[in-house]
Image (cartoon, rainbow, N blue to C red):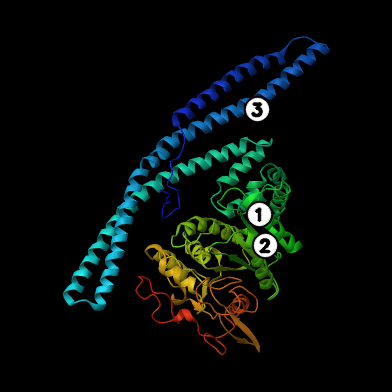
Amino acid sequence: MSLTSPNRGYPLERLEGSAGSMSWWSGAFSRVAGSLGDLRTTVQSATDLDGVGASITAARADAQEVANGLAAEIAEAELLAGVLQRYADAFSSSAEAANRLIDDIESAHAAWSSAAAEAEEAALSALSTSRSGEPADVRRANDAAQDAVATRDAAAGDLADLWEQFENHYSAWDTAYDAALAELAGGAGPAMTSEARSLLEQLLAADTPQAVLELWLAHEKLQKELKLAHPDIIGNLDGIPYDVRADVNSHRLEALYSSHPTGEFGEQIEALWNTLAQGGSHASLISFDPDGSAQVTAAIAYGDLATATDINVLVPGMLSNVTGMGEWGDSARALNAAGPGIASVVWFGYDSPTVAEEPSMQRANDGAPALRSFLLGLDAVHPASEKAVIAHSYGSTTAALAIGSRPDGLGVDQFIAVGSAGFPSDPEVLSNLENAEGLRTYATLSENDAWARIGRDTSWGGAHGTVPETLPGVTEFGSDGGSADGVDLAPTPGHASHDGGNGPLPSGDGEGYLVEGSESFYNIQQIILTGEPGTEMDGDGSERGFWDLPDWLEWLPVDPYRT
């Protein structure tokens, strides 16, 4: 059974390792350090040899050189001994505790799944009975459904308690693991000065992108050394200026592309290379992680972030990966052309869900921290710029969770959701979205969009079933066609961001939400420029769609939005 924790997205898998073995190796490295120390003391004594002459002078010099070399080896052995022992202690107290919960969680999940299925069956039976049954039968069916729901909810509570314990233990282990990596990063790889190593440790330990930026700017003389030693870290560390990140990431991508990788991974690297090349001098690779996720993740900035007064961040939804970044780049360039001083970032920085994963919050839970860190970094490096997040489908779910995770809205000024798969139903997230100072939220749903409605209605337990268009303070705008300034604007034919409709389900004709020439995209441009949509809802030329029928899946627990 493959499960992930509901709040943090931790995989329910056994954390491999042996605290005893790690402690043994720690002791071994300590013994090596001690032996090398004794040897260094002996060699060091040769530097004090009495006498004069070339031979004596040469012997003293050779002894000093050996002693200096041994000092580095001793430091490395001591580092490994310390890291291993600290990690062994954390593994024993946290990882092993998490491992002991796995069987209990799997059993509790099975019990909840069974109870949920029985509750659904009882609910459908009650629904069927209510249409044609006798009053007594209806009451019995409703009572049975209520009992089944109570049983399901109790099982869900038991499972949630176990998950909370697991996440606490897993988080403590994860923190210790990150700390061990940070220590090793400072002591492994290319040779680094002690000053650069100390700075790297401080950067990795910094709590916020703002702290990262301040550290980076305060140590200009060490920047080149860190870029050469650890481009993978510097190229993706939020708070590092974007010209620095773009430089190291482009070189990393070029090296990887030149190695001719194969398979699906190779296709993603080639697509990313081609997308960046097609963007020309106005495109820069400001994040790039080829091997840290289920899919290659990246972010490409179009335009000059350093001089932009308005910065847009585009976030994709279900089934997206870097092979599709090209059409998103077209949208970014079209946004930039809407007015002066605009730059746009295409952010493919999370593992998007498959169709089977979409009902869950797992991918949003995984992706939101990465997007939150990116937005905080953007605000730290370019605090004076207006910032808009434009998110499609499940990307709006992820973005809502990120932006709504803090009362300050992460410095975002405009949050624009198109074809949303539903916002998280967490009251705190929704409250932050509504009340964050300076944040305005906008949303549109095409009347021809089936999959957004299905996404809202089928989210597990209504986890992302909140309808954004009708939330307090949200400005709804049209995507069903119309005209502006004498120009006809196309309706969005279905759920797609660019090309396509609703798969085998009924669709209209027109352009995707983010295609230039559509009513949706025109309104997005106007929101960025003026703060308001450019057309009226259901105005002249607006089309009626199939999926706004008043009885659309009305028996489901979450009401889809209907115009």
Left or right, residue 70 beside residue 392: right
Residue 460 % position (x, y):
39, 62
What residue sits right under mark 3 in the picture?
A: 72
Q: From where the camera sits, is residue 184 visible?
A: yes
Q: Which amino acid type is marked by label 1? A: Glu
Q: Which amino acid type is marked by label 2? A: Ala
165 vs 53, nearest the viewer:
165
What residue sits right under mark 1 in the picture?
A: 267
Query: Residue at point 29% right, 65% down?
Result: 121
Outermost residue on the left side: it is 136
Q: Which amino acid type is marked by label 3? A: Ala
Q: Which of the marked residues, 3 or 1, is nearer the chain's N terminus?
A: 3
Outermost residue on the right side: it is 54
Quadrant of the rendered image containing residue 200: top right
Quadrant of the rendered image containing residue 79: top right
Q: Is residue 67 above or below residue 10?
A: above
Q: Are marks 2 and 1 in contact (CB under 8 Å)?
A: no
Label 3: element kind: helix
The 10 Å Cα crowd at callout 1, few under 14, some 14 to 19, many 20 or more, is some
Q: Which of the marked residues, 2 or 3, is nearer the chain's N terminus?
A: 3
Residue 33 % position (x, y):
58, 23
Q: CA distance from mark 2 to mark 1?
A: 21 Å
What residue sits right under mark 2 in the picture?
A: 301
Left or right, residue 85 beside residue 215: left
Q: CA distance from mark 3 to mark 1?
A: 42 Å
Q: Is residue 518 above or below residue 388?
A: below
Residue 555 % position (x, y):
34, 74
Q: Is residue 25 above or below residue 444?
A: above
